[in-house]
Image: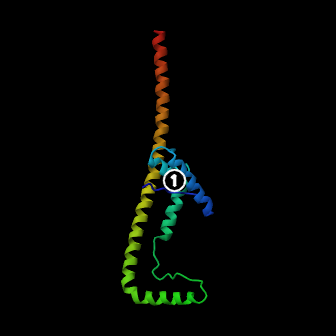
Amino acid sequence: MNVFSVYSEQSDVELLMQSVAERLKRFEAGEGGSHEIAAFSLYPVGWEDEDTERNVELLIAQWDIDSSEIIHSTRPVLGPAIITFQHIVRRLTWWFLNPIVHQISRFNHSAVRVIHSLYRQQCASNQQLNEMATRLAAAERTIAELTQRIEELEKDR
């Protein structure tokens, strides 16, 4: 089974699903290389750099679970009954649900902190890698210049 992830700025579901269908047709036709590459080629190039920080911020904003949140219904007659039923169930089960909700929230806190830490480490590693690549290019230029000078000196001998 292949799993496809999709990132899109489209707000229209039909356009998004059309993009997915087109990508699946290309995948089934053998375009895109291996399964792993095909699964990730739906993301635009450079999406990680643009969205990772924003996604970490969203995770931080959503790490707490509100056990008292009510799912509202706009149905004219049934809506208020559903909300009242939710309030009653929440009051009857708080002793059971609250410890579970707190445990899940603590796990979410820890997971988000780890993800954020890994993201910061990756950013630092990328910066170090870019600096090292720049230094390596400079060193290669210096080696090429020195090699050329050595060849010139050997010719003059």
- Quadrant of the image containing the C terminus: top left
Closer to us: 141 or 89: 89
The answer to whether any part of residue 37 appears in the image is yes
User: Which quadrant of the structure image shows residue 121?
Assistant: bottom left
Q: In the image, residue 140 lies at what x, y percent?
A: 47, 30
Residue found at x 48% / y 11%: 155
Q: In the image, residue 39 lies at what x, y percent?
A: 48, 51
Q: Residue lying at the far top in this picture: please name it.
A: 157
Q: Which colour scheme is used?
A: rainbow
Badge 1 marks a residue whose secondary structure is: helix
Amino acid marked by disc 1: Glu
Q: Residues within 10 Å of mark 1 (few under 14, many from 20)?
A: few
Residue annotated with mark 1: 48
User: Which quadrant of the structure image shows residue 21?
Assistant: bottom right
Closer to us: 153 or 28: 28
Give the side of residue 116 with respect to residue 7, left or right. left
Residue found at x 51% / y 53%: 48
Q: In the image, residue 98 lies at what x, y percent?
A: 39, 82
Residue found at x 51% / y 64%: 57
Looking at the image, residue 63 lies above or below residue 9? below
Q: In the image, residue 150 lies at what x, y percent?
A: 46, 18
